[in-house]
Amino acid sequence: MKKIRAAVFASGAGSNFQAIMEKNDLLCEVALLVCDKPGASVLEKAEKFGVPTFVFDSEEYASKSDYEKDLVRKLQQSDISWIFLAGYMRIVGPTLLRAYKNRIINIHPSMLPEFPGKDAIGQAFKAGVSDTGVTVHFIDEGIDTGPIIAQEPVEVFKDDTVETLKERIQLVEHRLYPIVINRLMK
Ligand code: GAR
């Protein structure tokens, strides 16, 4: 049977992209990597895994709806039916949301609704909480909002630094995201 074709959207290092690619029994095919940061290291990872890329620079477009129209065109040409945001540091606008209604999920390094937005790990660390975690959710037009699909707590240890906390949170992300993806593909 033909596998569902999905796109991963990422802006940075791509460790979650890598974790998805390394899942042996992934129930979909990652057929496209979309990146808004020319030169981001996730692009080297895509090359290593032989995943085609679509790279865009938002500054070359007049508006979000303009670049999202281009994205939708590319996604449709590539027969993509699901989108997994993995460190895509942009708010998705109505053009893309409407084209992929209930088919866009995101991973975020906190127990949402706590610590949305950028640097969730730094925010949690500064707040001095004893627990934080990871959330996978459907997106809507807000910043890290939308129906929650799965969450897993991560304890903050007394001797943690932001770096050690980030390492443990990302280990959870790398395990959780591919599992949740498979659950949704069934
Ligand atoms: C991940 O920790 C992801 O949860 C976070 O960006 C990181 C990307 O790392 N996303 C957000 O903060 C979304 N608001 P990666 O590029 O190594 O996968």
Image (cartoon, rainbow, N blue to C red):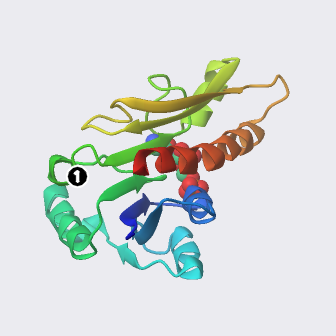
Q: Seen in the image, is 178 located left or right of residue 130?
A: left
Residue found at x 50% / y 32%:
150
The three-letter amino acid code for the residue at tag 1 is Tyr
Q: Seen in the image, is 81 located left or right of residue 23?
A: left
Q: Position of residue 122 (x, y in %)?
A: 61, 34
Instruction: From this view, report whether residue 27 is shown above or below residue 167.
Output: below
Q: Position of residue 1 (x, y in %)?
A: 39, 69
Is residue 95 in view from this perspective? yes
How many callouts does the rendering have? Answer: 1
Q: Position of residue 121 (x, y in %)?
A: 60, 35
Residue found at x 54% / y 68%:
42
Residue corresponding to mark 1:
100
Residue found at x 33% / y 31%:
146
In the figure, residue 13 lies in which quadrant? bottom right
Q: Seen in the image, is 157 located left or right of residue 141?
A: right
How many C-alpha atoms fall within 10 Å of the one at disc 1: few (<14), some, or many (≥20)?
some
Residue found at x 68% / y 18%:
128
Report whether the residue tagged 1 is closer than 8 Å to ligand 1. no
The residue positioned farthest toward the right in the image shown: 159
Is residue 36 in view from this perspective? no
